[in-house]
Image: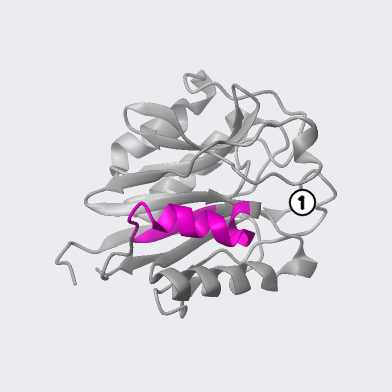
């Protein structure tokens, strides 16, 4: 057991306006300020909506300024979803210093593969001594992805996801498997509301699970909700 300061992590599901990066960045910024957390996790493609033809979001896009400023003011790391250069579905790591591409989705859905290319490697971020492994949606359903990420030595498996309301149980099943198999915290920020790709009613219900697979915190199904938890130290896997 390692003696570390607990990591305050929040999962957020802001209202998303299709393709409106400026409006969505403002909503992300509001969530960051409300969360009072060190890490704030957002759903898959949260900055554009699940619009597979949306233009890429450059890391120096001025529309991200409100989110950068919110992170600067709160000391938060925001993990937001966006399409990025190279035709990848990605997680942007946003701090007060700006945005970087932190992770590129490795396992694509069939429709996604018509435009996007898979990322080639798992990613782990170090946040105050906590090792946070990143995932995006379908990655969470591929056992090899969690295993390869956990092999890098992680404390938290953090995923931005999108599920239909009819598949609301899927993230729970995957989170329980990942948490109990690898002994890590699992956080999933799940899209809420309506978005492209036929997702007229997304599941929401973003949540955080303990390394024993127990539910620690959960939102409801409506856009604009968020919830946080303090993650205590655990024996690191890998």
Q: In x, y percent, where is residue 138?
A: 66, 53
Look at the picture and state if 210 lies above or below 201.
below
Quarter the C terminus occupies: bottom left
- Label 1, on which residue? 194
Q: 10 Å neighbourhood of mark 1: few (<14), some, or many (≥20)?
A: many
Q: Residue furthest right?
A: 198
Q: In x, y percent, where is residue 2?
A: 17, 67
Look at the picture and state if 22 lies above or below 219.
above
Quarter the N terminus occupies: bottom left
Asked whether 115 or 202 is in front, the reply is 115
Q: Write down the region rendered in magenta.
A: 139-159
The residue drawn where x is 71% and y is 59% is 163
The residue drawn where x is 31% and y is 60% is 8
Say left or right for 183 vs 110: left
Say left or right for 11 vs 54: left
The answer to whether residue 226 of the structure is visible from this angle is no
Residue 71 on the magenta span: no
Asked whether 157 or 39 is in front, the reply is 157
In terms of secondary structure, where does tag 1 sit? loop
Examine the image and state in which quarter residue 50 appears: top right
The residue drawn where x is 66% and y is 66% is 221
Q: How many marks?
A: 1
Say left or right for 89 vs 58: right
Q: In x, y percent, where is residue 34?
A: 42, 53
Residue 158 on the magenta span: yes
Asked whether 72 or 84 is in front, the reply is 84
The residue drawn where x is 64% and y is 48% is 15
């Amino acid at each position: 057991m390692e003696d570390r300061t607990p990591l305050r992590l929040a999962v957020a599901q802001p209202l998303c306006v299709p393709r409106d990066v400026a409006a969505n960045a403002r909503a992300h910024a509001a969530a960051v300020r409300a969360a009072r957390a060190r890490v704030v996790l957002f759903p898959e493609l949260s900055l554009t909506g699940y619009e597979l033809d949306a233009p890429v979001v450059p890391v120096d896009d001025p529309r991200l300024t409100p989110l950068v400023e919110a992170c600067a003011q709160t000391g938060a790391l925001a993990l937001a979803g966006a399409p990025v250069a190279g035709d990848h579905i990605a997680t942007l790591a946003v701090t007060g210093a700006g945005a970087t591409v932190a992770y590129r989705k490795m396992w694509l859905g069939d429709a996604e593969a018509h435009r996007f290319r898979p990322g080639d490697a798992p990613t782990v971020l170090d946040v105050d001594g906590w090792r946070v492994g990143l995932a995006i949606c379908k990655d969470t359903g591929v056992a090899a992805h969690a295993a390869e990420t956990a092999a890098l030595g992680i404390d938290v498996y953090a995923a931005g996801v999108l599920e239909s309301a009819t598949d609301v149980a899927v993230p729970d099943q995957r989170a329980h498997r990942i948490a109990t198999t690898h002994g890590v915290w699992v956080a999933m920020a799940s899209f809420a509301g309506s978005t492209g790709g036929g997702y007229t009613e997304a599941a929401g219900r973003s949540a955080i699970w303990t390394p024993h697979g127990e539910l620690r915190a959960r939102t409801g199904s409506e856009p604009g909700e968020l919830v946080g938890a303090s993650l205590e130290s655990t024996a690191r896997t890998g």
